[in-house]
Image (tube, coloured by chain):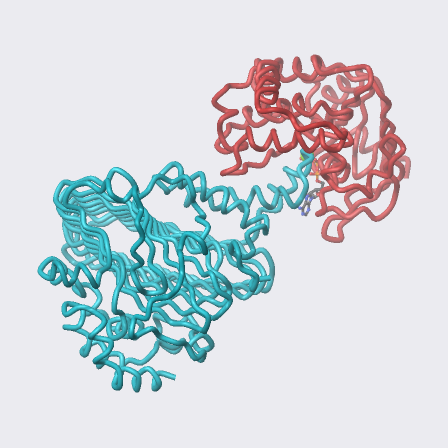
Amino acid sequence: MEQQYIDLYKQQHESIKKHSAAVMNDSRDDAFALFEALRFPTVALENYKYTDLKEPLSIDYGLNINRIPIPVNPYEVFQCDVPGIHSYLYFVVNDAFYPVNEPRNKALPKGVIIGSLKEVATTHPELVKNYFGKLSTTKNDGLIAFNGAFAQDGFFMYVPKNVVLDKPVQLVNIMRSDVDFMANSHNLIILEEGAKAQLLVCDHTVDEVHFLSNRVTEVFAGEDATYEHYKLENTHTKTTNLSTLLIDQHPSSNVLANVITLHNGVTRNTIEIDLDGEHCETLLCGMVIGDKNQQVDNFTSIIHNKPNCNSRELFKYVLDGMAKGGFTGKLYVAKDAQKTSAFQTNRNILLNKTAKMRTKPQLEIYADDVKCSHGATIGQLDETAKFYMQSRGIPESEARLLLMFAFTNDVIENIRIPALQDRIKLLVEKRLRGELSKCEGCVICQ
Amino acid sequence: MLEIKNLHANINGKEILKGLDLVVRPGEIHAIMGPNGAGKSTLASVLTGNQTFEVTKGEVTFYGKNLLELTPEDRSREGIFLSFQYPVEIPGVSMVNFMRTALNEHRKYKNMEPLSATDFLRIMREKKTLVEMDNKLANRSVNEGFSGGEKKRNEIFQMAMLEPRLAILDETDSGLDIDALRIVANGVNKLKRPDNASIVITHYQRLLEYIVPDFVHVLYDGRIVKTGGKELALELEDKGYDWIKKEVEENI
Ligand SMILES: Nc1ncnc2c1ncn2[C@@H]1O[C@H](COP(=O)(O)OP(=O)(O)OP(=O)(O)O)[C@@H](O)[C@H]1O
Ligand SMILES: [Mg+2]
């Protein structure tokens, strides 16, 4: 199934490059060569044991190499899941940055650049060149290589030294197409020394076709920078969402990444956070609510390269139906990364016998003066707690709901934007009640 | 109000209740005493609908209704309350949310409107005062990290909130210091009305000095083998259970 894409690249690489930017094209042929060698990952690979892409990759997707504008008004097709959040608002439709005239975006602090990666790579090539591909091109991963060959645009955000973004930035990815469609996008986020920013990425689908999104996001958190990355996925069951998040932390930077899958088809999150300076703080968390035939695999790595850093990781899954969950928590502590403290927790609830969860901690610790721990559990809802609630008059269904909600609570508490936290609480509750079994305005998930 | 006839119940195929009879009328206080493992908590579990126990024989009616057919939540809404011997911790579920949900479910059952937030908080405040419960506890997750005594006090607080017709207190006194015991007993007495009743399971005569029973029953080997007035509790405390065991054996 790779062959059609290999042929496509060989025939179309000129067009691909023509509709992208030079900085992005520099590494394109190498990425393609790497993809040709690696191919798409299969479950035979250790790192892809829990992500089965055979079916989604057998679909014949269209690509928009020639960047034909998609006729869509994002405001019309998309009802925001998190309205009322005061944010700077941007759209990416499929894999193209979608310019909208948002009055509220005019007030961006001085020096901040937010826009299309393709455009900024043309207008500010020196800036982009210093960062683009620095994290992604070194990875030996078929999906990342594929993205390197085919991605032509994406979202770009630059926050200069000591600038603080006063409001969160909201990036809404909308998948919109009349035919089965594949989107490859590359996001680049740069925070210079002392900068502060919060990014909320929302993934949505609006049409009833099959979508495959293969996205790579590179984040550079400069010295003393503070970055929060929230990803809220609410897509339909015919969506395959392959998302790579690579974060590089400089000394004393503070990063929070919280990835929430509320509804989806097949999801693979590859997340790698490199601690490349001392005194970094990292909190990586996420939750999954899955039912039907949904699949979610969070493959995470936290790499302690330098001493005196703290990382904490927390993932929670609630699975029902025939849902399949996978979690890998790789923790690497380099030989001289002394005084590392790293804690990892993955807890899962299976609501029936057909849902499946596989979890794997993977610790490689080469330093001796460290505090590390990991724990994984797979269980059911606490029956004694349920009975206790029932004995007070609370119906069984409500008791289950309260327990599930309580279970996910500590992930939700790690959302540091209060309005967003409230909103996500509500969405999670709706989802657990089965009221959000399909995304708004879409009919195929029934 | 409550009639138990020839009740048999199993757990994992092992028979625990072996033909238990008991009648409770409005206004009465019944104490149940008996050696460890006799089946006292099992009785409480069966009455509240805990599915881990299987009723194999017998009848239980509550105000004429077949209790055994009701779900645990409906039994609660009908007015049965159990103060658990081992209250359960529920991390992540706040006391406020828990109590509000429970209370509103009770109201729904009686075709009453849900309480407004202000009314609910007012009632909560009143009942907290009644059992002298610390404000901090009410703001935490249900029983999470509560001390043994705090958990017991929380049970009585919940009882005060739900105003049951039949309260079953399963060793609510164990683990309480003297002051707490007095507060808990006081709470129970203040909630007493001529139309409600209590079953007090205890090992100690001490509690019965505060909550004075009309009847004292001895539960032994899955049955009520002896019933007397409040003086029976004193006798048991004095002499232990051996003489009762002997009596039972002689009767066989
Ligand atoms: N979950 C269970 N599995 C197996 N046996 C059980 C279970 N629960 C109770 N039992 C058994 O049932 C019997 C009665 O237990 P129960 O808790 O009703 O006793 P009790 O009279 O309340 O005792 P205590 O005074 O110690 O509280 C005991 O032998 C106990 O071991
Ligand atoms: Mg007991």
Q: Residue at x 62, y 26 (%)?
A: B155
Farthest left residue?
A126
Residue A283 appearing in the image: no
Chain A colour as displayed? cyan
Please state which of residues A314 and B241 is positioned toward the viewer in this rendering.
A314
Which residue is pictured at 43% across the width and 58% down the height? A204
**Residue A85 image point, x, y percent:** 38, 40
Please indicate whether residue B95 sits to the left or right of residue B47 in the image.
left
Q: Considering only vertical position in the picture, is B247 above or below A303?
A: above
Foreground residue, A216 or B36?
A: A216
**Which x, y percent locates residue A255?**
25, 47
The residue that appears at 27% across and 74% down in the rendered structure is: A150
Q: Quadrant of ligand 2?
A: top right
Q: Quadrant of the N terminus of chain B?
A: top right
Chain letter of the red region: B
Whether residue A265 sits left or right of residue B71 in the image: it is left
Q: Is residue A363 above or below residue B229?
A: below
The x, y position of residue A100, in whole percent, is 31, 52
B170 left or right, relative to A288? right
Q: Residue at x 17, y 63 (%)?
A: A132
- The percent position of residue A76, horizontal first and vertical second, equals 44, 53
Q: Is residue A89 above or below residue B167?
A: below
Quadrant for the C terminus of chain B, please: top right
Q: How many numbered circles are shown? A: 0
- From this viewpoint, is residue A104 visible? yes
